Image (tube, grey):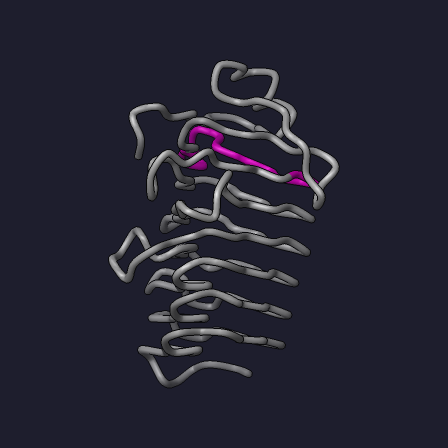
């Protein structure tokens, strides 16, 4: 996590970040969403026990990178993406998006790009370690599309599109339900399953 970090300890959204952290968050213009914020800091959604909750609803969250992974997102709490876009200010530098064990992640009708740049744990892209619900989600221009780690058992995924440079979908989790997946333009495996049972397609 970067030294410049926004710690979210209560309920937050794009508007509240813009109002509460003006030194690190600015308004921007997006072709995707009605609201756009440009963030010059990492975002740390704190544990649910202390109320960490970030909702991106109709919002583009643009992380300003000065190098690979200079700022990123880590969630220990509740995180919701609805008609949202998570990206960076440049295609030259990717960021990280890590969802920790015992947190909550819900994604619907959303996009992400420029996530991850290598196979190293923590730098692969969207890395999920908790059961999640992901519906209508497109991931572009990253290294891995979606990474499900051991804690992501029983995740439910539907209508996913990955179009990235490395592996489209990587999973170490079990009891995964997948309904609708398009994987294209991968330079490595489109699909990498470390556990070859208990998947529903």
Q: Residue at horizontal 53%, vertical 75%?
A: 184
- Judged from this view, the residue extending furthest toward the left is 120
Counting from the top left corner in percent of width and height, residue 11 is at 57, 28
Q: Is residue 1 left or right of residue 48?
A: left
Q: Which residues are magenta?
A: 44-59
Q: Is residue 82 above or below residue 25?
A: below
Q: Is residue 138 left or right of residue 165?
A: right
Counting from the top left corner in percent of width and height, residue 156 is at 55, 67
Q: Residue at horizontal 55%, vertical 30%?
A: 38
Q: Is residue 15 above or below residue 186?
A: above
Q: Residue at horizontal 49%, vertical 14%?
A: 23
Q: Residue at horizontal 56%, vertical 16%?
A: 20
Q: Is residue 53 above or below residue 131?
A: above
Query: In the figure, residue 59 lies in which quadrant?
Result: top right
Q: Is residue 101 above or below residue 138?
A: above
**Residue 38 part of the magenta-drawn span:** no
* Foreground of the two, 83 or 105: 83
Counting from the top left corner in percent of width and height, residue 75 is at 42, 41
Query: In the figure, residue 37 lies in which quadrant?
Result: top right
Counting from the top left corner in percent of width and height, residue 199 is at 46, 81
Quarter of the figure with the C terminus: bottom right
């Amino acid at each position: 996590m970067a030294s410049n970090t926004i710690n979210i300890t209560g309920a937050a959204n794009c508007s509240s970040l813009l109002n509460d952290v003006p030194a690190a968050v600015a308004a921007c213009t997006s072709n995707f969403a009605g609201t756009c914020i440009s963030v010059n800091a990492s975002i740390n959604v704190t544990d649910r026990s202390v109320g960490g909750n970030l909702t991106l609803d109709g919002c583009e969250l643009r992380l300003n990178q000065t190098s690979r992974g200079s700022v990123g997102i880590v969630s220990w709490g509740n995180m919701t993406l609805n008609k949202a876009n998570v990206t960076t200010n440049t295609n030259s530098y990717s960021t990280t998006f890590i969802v920790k064990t015992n947190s909550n992640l819900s994604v619907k009708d959303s996009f992400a790009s420029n996530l991850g740049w290598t196979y190293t744990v923590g730098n692969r892209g969207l890395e999920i370690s908790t059961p999640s619900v992901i519906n209508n989600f497109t991931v572009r221009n990253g290294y891995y599309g979606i990474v499900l780690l051991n804690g992501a058992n029983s995740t439910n995924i539907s209508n996913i599109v990955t179009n990235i440079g490395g592996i489209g979908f990587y999973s170490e989790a079990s009891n995964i339900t997948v309904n609708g997946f398009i994987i294209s333009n991968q330079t490595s495996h489109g699909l990498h399953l470390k556990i070859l049972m208990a998947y529903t397609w």
